[in-house]
Amino acid sequence: MTKRLLAIYLVLVVLLAAFIPGCTGPTTGTIEVKATLDGAPWAGNVSYKLSPTSGADVNGTAVAANFTVAAGNWTCAYVSGGPGIFVNITPSTTQEVVAGGTKTFVLNFRTPATPDAWVTFTSWTINGQVVDPAAGPFPVVWGDIIDCEYKEHVEGEQGEVVTVHQTSWLKIHNFGFEGEPGPVILLHAVNDPGAVTMHPDAEKKENQTCTVDGVPVPACTEIELPFCEWINLDVEVDWDLVICTEYEKTINWIGFPVPMAGLPVLFDAPGMLHMQTLQLVSYACVEVEGDENPDNDCSGDSPMLTVIFQLPP
């Protein structure tokens, strides 16, 4: 009897082993994804991807977040968004998730550097040749161009592109001839696209508008320069500039065109038929959104340049 009971018991053990699954441990773990901004915890929308050694990726859209994943090596990659400039992922971009364990990926961001734009007057030039205003007055004839140069720069995030609104003024004075009254000088608005240039080339010129005393003037508008009155001409341009690049801006202000020939200038004086003296002063300002230091946005007045238009012999 004892042997028979023992046999029945053994059969029952085998049947139980066959039909009742054995106890096994967990096969998944947890990944938590967090973020910091300037070293402090941050929560919000940001896109990232969790990738296993094999299998489907898991896409995240916000932090902080937890994911239940299969045990194994997982890699975290930043995709887009977040509170500022993405820096890195700590403690490592790839970590091993063990069954029942938790691994944390931290997306680290920093606040972008605040832009700071500045402009300085560099020189007066005639036909592209630098002149010293103190050595004037300088003779000019038909075909000549009076221009000036500025240096411009935007501090901030290296390599980023920002839109800079630039306004440059030319204060012009009809001084007659050697201070004696002369006829009214007639200028002509040209606004040639090549009259204002950047070196190196800007990413994009958004627009270019000429004004007189702040009022926009379309091409072909005539502007009177009465004797002994200062008139304010200006040009407004929006440029897309690369941060931390030093630019040299050239403005071809006034041209004295040969009859029936145009010049790449903002304004010209096509009807000059008498010897006339012009006194010129230029200055410029720049504007960028969020400018850190507005105190250096304007150049101040340039030295005064004096030129005498002369008829050819």
Image (spheres, grey):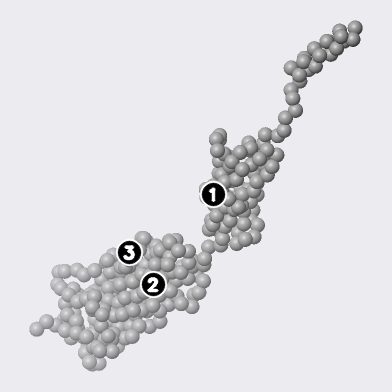
Is there any visible trace of residue 10 in the rendered image? yes
Whether residue 33 sits left or right of residue 193 in the image: it is: right
Visible in this render: residue 227? Answer: no
Cα gap from disc 3 to disc 2, whole angstroms: 12 Å
Point out the frontmost of discs 2 and 1: 1
Q: In this view, does 71 lie above or below 40?
A: above
Residue occupying image coordinates x 64% and y 53%: 43
**Residues at badges 3 and 2 in contact (C-beta under 8 Å)?**
no
Q: How crowded is mark 2: few (under 14 residues within 10 Å), some or many (20 or more)?
A: many
Q: How far across and how far down the image is residue 13, in percent?
A: 80, 16
The N terminus lies in quadrant = top right
Q: Name the residue under label 3.
A: 201
Name the residue beneath numbered marker 2. 152
Residue drawn 74% across the image and 17% down it = 18
Quadrant in which residue 126 is drawn: bottom left
Q: Nearer the viewer, residue 15 or 208?
A: 15
What amino acid is found at the position of numbered circle 1 in the picture? Tyr
Mark 1 or mark 3, earlier in chain = 1
Quadrant hosting residue 136: bottom left
Q: Is mark 1 on a helix, strand or loop?
A: strand
**Image-based side of 73 in relation to 243, left or right:** right
Q: On screen, 53 above or below 175?
A: above
Residue at point 43%, 61% (across, down): 159
Report the amino acid beneath label 3: Asp
- Say which mark, if any, is on residue 238: none
CA gap, disc 2 to disc 1?
35 Å
Up-down relation of residue 68 to residue 137 (above or below): above
Q: In the image, which is nearer the foreground, mark 1 or mark 3?
A: 1
Q: What element carries label 3?
A: loop
Label placed on residue 78: 1
Dot 2 or dot 1: first in sequence order is 1
Q: Where is residue 267 in the image (x, y as percent from the top left)?
A: 27, 73
